[in-house]
Image (cartoon, helix red, strand yellow):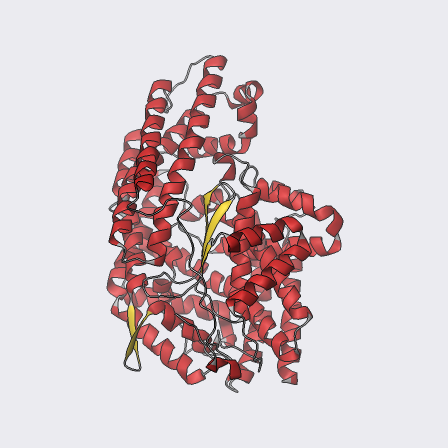
Amino acid sequence: MEIPSPNGPASAAALPTPPRWDLSPIFPSLDSPEFAAGFAGALAALHDLKALFDREGIAGGKSGASAEDERASFESVVTAYNAAIESINTVRGYIALHVSTDSRNAAAQAKLSEIRREMVTLSLLDKRLAAWVGTIDVDRLLASSELARTHEFAIKQLRIQSERLMAPGEEDLAASLHLAGGGAWGKLHGDITSQLIVSLDGVEQPMSVIRGLASNEDRETRRKAYEAELAAWERVSIPLCAAMNSIKHEANVLAGRRGWGDVLNVALYNNHIDRPTLDAMMTAARAAFPDFRRYMRAKARVVSGEKALAWYDLFAPLGDSTRTWAWPEAEAFIEKQFGAYSDKMRQFAVRAFREKWIDAEPRPGKRDGAFCMGIRPGESRIMQNYKPAFDGVGTLAHELGHGYHNLCLADRTNLQRQTPSTLAETASIFCETIARGAALKDASKEDQLAIVEDSLQGSCQVVVDITSRFLFEQRVLERRKDRELSVSELCDIMRGAQLETYGDGLNADLLHPYMWAVKGHYYGSSFYNFPYMFGLLFGLGLYAIYKREPDSFYGRYDDLLSRTGMAGSVELAQGFGIDIRDVAFWNASFDQIRAEVSLFEQLTSAA
């Protein structure tokens, strides 16, 4: 498949096809003997782990064991746990990579269903481990075991979780029913959206292609794609509404039964932050909304001559740049800019390209968006739907940043690598910022406009749109406590959240009421939204420190990335002199975005 350039004279020329990844170093194929052995080995490791839990009495209830027995049980169980999860994650990740690029792959879907069933056992073992930790003398264990001391944060997190568990039989039932509950509804959303075909001008195309037209240079094309997209979402809204209702009901019930109070408290625990941190960040975000609206109004003047943006103009490209970024150019650029930061980062990028870790070619059956998955220690796979413009390069740098983070975590055990979503974005934002700064340095005015627009477009999504999603989810969860919500009610809640956040930057008659159907995040973990904002602003804050103190930064930064599963966000930030409970830190990060808004206004006025 060849992708034409979206800009200028080069559009007539064919560009090199972006690559597909090579999964064969993991297993030759899904039907290979090696995969069969790996699959069987992963399940055997899981069953052996369960047997070990049974022998060691890893469960709730009064322990009464001696210090030596507790130490021996902990060390044998945690060693086996880390090894088993490593094996399971590789097999499960390999299957998921196949499904993400071809949701019609029946063999992969069947294997994914099999391993999801087995994950019920793992979920129950996690609960048993937490319950057991809740019964032992943690201080005594930490004093007697070096292995425990290197897993101190995980132990303390398990201790908190132990206080939020239902009775063992109830946890067993909840995990078993999840396969036919939230897990099944989430899978339904993924299957429907990845296979959704949209008719545009009499031509049927995958939804990922239609949504990609949101950044087409022709406004009429964007408008028609937007209208076709909304019509397609309406067509599948009933099953997606059922999925949303079911998932949020399950989340509410479990949060209540486990004593969390509300679902947001679960998300804060999972993301290793507290309410004062979230409140400080959200306060700073609301203070920045007027600046984002300045950006949107300035863009509207250029795109349409109107006072506010239509939804279908949010991603409109700006600038008269004829620059295209064919895939080989993107590779060379990333290697060079990562190398300007450190040779370690450059070598990582070279390896990712050379060993074909990246699947960048858009095609039917492939899911929308982009992600990076750690598949083995230090080794990742990256999926994106590459566009030959700088936003495609920025996305590539972002996802490679996740891969670099995985590299820094390579020597940690699985329990030590349990990085929350808040900190998972740290390296990706950092690497994306490196790429953008380098691209701006030598760019023409037209290219500068395109790059700054791409940056602000992304920041607007991560701050303004993310806040709208946060408000939407809060309100849906609250109202779902009383009854099911209809399609029209979900659309009304989404419109209200968009109006509250985008304000007069958007045309109130041209919003996206079906954004709740688009975003897969609603159908997995609840409140998967605010961690992206945290990641953006925390990454920008770290980048500012790097620019001020480059010589002392590198070692501390890699150490932070290696410890994102070993300490809370407050503690890790303090290592760089950052107080994330202080609104001032978040405002300082927003100041970097405000400077981009001012530059954008200058460039658009000149244009």
- Which sits in the foreground, 271 or 118? 118
The spot of residue 407 in percent (x, y) is: 55, 44
- From this viewpoint, is residue 274 visible? no
Whether 239 is drawn above or below 144: the answer is below
Q: Is residue 313 left or right of residue 244?
A: right
Residue in the picture at 29% in, 34% down = 172
The spot of residue 343 in percent (x, y) is: 66, 50
Whether 569 is drawn above or below 425: the answer is above
- Which sits in the foreground, 406 or 461? 406
- Which sits in the foreground, 291 or 12? 12
Q: Quadrant of residue 476?
A: bottom left
Whether 426 is drawn above or below 169: the answer is below
Q: Quadrant of the N terminus?
A: bottom left
The spot of residue 74 in percent (x, y) is: 46, 22
Residue in the picture at 52% in, 84% down = 9
Residue in the picture at 52% in, 75% down = 505
- Which sits in the foreground, 152 or 104? 104
- From this viewpoint, is residue 562 visible? yes
The spot of residue 334 in percent (x, y) is: 59, 60
Whether 568 is drawn above or below 385: the answer is above
Residue in the picture at 38% in, 51% down = 97
Q: Quadrant of the C terminus?
A: bottom right
